[in-house]
Structure formats: structure tokens, C-alpha cells
Image (spheres, grey):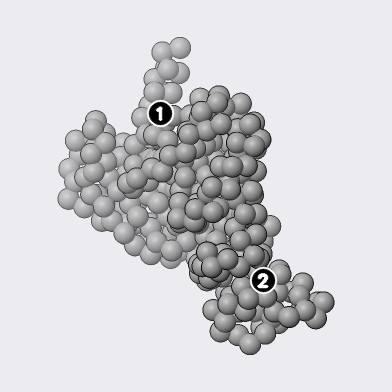
Amino acid sequence: MEYVVGVDAGGTSTTAAAYDWDTAGLLGRGQSGYGNALVDYAVAMEHLREAIGKAVEGLQGTCRLILAGAAGATAGGLNERIAAELSDFFHCKTAVETDARLALEGSLQGSDGILIISGTGSIATGRKGEIIQTAGGWGNLIGDEGSGYDLVRRTIRLMTEDANHGRPEKPVCRKVREFFGVPDTRQVIGYLHSHVKADIAKASPVVERAAEAGDPDAKRFLSEAGEALAALVTCLANRLELPAGFPLALQGSVIRNVAPIRNRMLEVLRETGITCSPVTPEGDLTCGAWHYAKALEKKQSAAHSS
């Protein structure tokens, strides 16, 4: 038996799954803690090894490839270091890409199109043939537009503007501040700088519920988030010169569950002449490793034959 292992190593947890090389059938799964090597390299590697070990436990045969989609892995060449260590540990070929690349493979299953991710953060990645390009994904300091984190950031920015002008606190701002459990805007800023992105983004449902209740500021933030995501998709559609009707895969809790953001994004795309077919992939995105491995084999075979 031959198989491929896909690893989704995120900022919260790591999931690994083994797939039969011939049928893509699921053979085993494993889970562990966070896999973002930028947080703590040694701990992230321990989690990666643990999750992969559980996924392949008891399997007989040869592992053709381990593909890890790891958050933060491409920073400072960490992907090469992680790949080398995993290859030495499991004695097989290993590749490390971004978590967005793994999600692209799993969502589009090897076809051309664009994947837009909006959850805690945001990023868009697309493919046309062998060309793969990305827009966004610059992190929460300057990017993550249209994400859950961004909804909260927009609300906090409104807090600071009102504080500057001595204006009364807006309702949505008060609700977010109370979610953080602090008494004033200054301490909201302190909370912002003393907590990680995921902790800040946990307040995004507060903004979403305020919009549902008719709060004008919250509704504006959701609309602007949809516009920001549309801009990312437009960048890639134009750069890749994708044909009309290309598949647009939607991933992440925000874009999939917050209808006003999703609908505004699609509305803006139509207004700008970008026609696409939205799809909401189901199942485990670690299956992207199987599609990645098959495409790699096909490319290598073509190179050898030429």
C-alpha cells in the first residue's frame, strides 16, 4: 500500500490525515496542538510529529509524500527547516507550503480558480495551470482585511476616533469594549496589544450581531469587509486572467457564515465585471495533499519523458 499524508498546521490545532495513493480513501487521522512555528518552533514541531504519527499509526506500506500546510512556515525559510526535520523523522519525502496552499488544493481539487479565506484572518490564493499566486495574507498588523479580526479592528478604530473628538461611545463600540471586560477605550488598546490575534477576533460575533440588530456602524463594517474581500479576488482574477465563471471557493467561518459580508463581496465582483461560480467545499482540506502529490507526479513524469 502507498499513501499520502496531509497536515493542516494552524494557529490553534494541527490535523493530519493519511490518504490511499490510488483511491484517495481516508486511512487514518491524528490531531494535536498548534502548528504555527512562529509561536514556538520546538513545540510546533512536536505537535506536527504527534499528529502525523497518529495518522499513520498501524499503516503498512510506503508514504509517498507528507505535505504540511503550516501557518507562518514560509517566514524566514522555516518551511525548508520543517520539511527537512519531518523528512528525517518519518523517512519519506516531505513538502511544506502555506496553509492557504493546502486549502487551495483541497478546495479546488486541482482545478483552476480562486480560494478566498476569511476567518480569524484573510487571504486569497488562485491557480491557472501551473501558476499559483496570492493576494493578501499580510498578517494582522497591516492586512487581514475582511476577516473577523478586521471587523473588531474597525470597531476599535471608531472608538479611538470618537474618543479623540469627545463624542459619545457608539453602541457597537460599547458592546465590543464590554466583551473585552475593560472600562474605557485606553484599556481596550491595552487589551489589543497584550492579546494575540485570535483573542481579538473572538469579539467579531459581537459586531455581526449588532449589524443583524440594525446598528448602522456595524452594518457598515460588514459591508466594507465584503468590499475588501472582493478586492483580493479581483486582484487575482485579473493577474491570472481567469475565464468568466471560474470557481470561487469560500473557506473560513466569516465568509461562509456571515451572509452580509459574503453577499456584498459577490455584489461588488458583479459590479466590477468579475463573473465567478461560488462553491463551499465540504470535508477535510488535508485531502489537498493527495491532489498536490498527484499533480507533482504528473509534472515529474512529463519532465522525464521530455
Q: Which residue is drawn at the image coordinates 58% and 75% (left, top)?
A: 176
Give the left or right position of residue 13, taking residue 235 as reference. left
**42 relative to 165, above or below:** above
Residue at which label 2 appears? 156
Label 1 SS: helix
Nearer to the camera, 166 or 51: 166
Label 2 SS: helix
Give the farthest residue toward the top. Answer: 306
| Amino acid bearing label 1 | Ala
**199 relative to 104, above or below:** below
Marks 1/2: CA distance? 45 Å
Location of residue 266 in the rendering, given as x and y in whole percent from the top left corner:
56, 42
Identify the image quadrant of residue 3. Answer: top left
Identify the image quadrant of residue 125. Answer: top right
Location of residue 160 in the rendering, given as x and y in whole percent from the top left corner:
74, 74
| Amino acid bearing label 2 | Ile
Q: Which residue is drawn at the image coordinates 62% and 54% (left, top)?
A: 223
**Quadrant location of the C terminus?**
top left
Q: Which residue is drawn at the image coordinates 34% and 62% (left, top)?
A: 32
Q: Which mark is residue 78?
A: none
Q: Let me know if residue 201 appears in the view.
A: no
**Quadrant location of the N terminus?**
top left
Location of residue 227 in the rendering, given as x and y in whole percent from the top left corner:
64, 48
Numbered-mark total: 2
Nearer to the camera, 156 or 45: 156
Q: Given this view, does label 1 or label 2 mark the residue nearer the observer?
A: 2
Nearer to the camera, 67 or 138: 138
Q: Let me know if residue 225 appears in the view.
A: yes
Q: Which mark is residue 295?
A: 1
Q: Tell me which label, 1 or 2, sits earlier in the chain.
A: 2
Give the farthest residue toward the front. Answer: 214
Give the farthest residue toward the right. Answer: 165
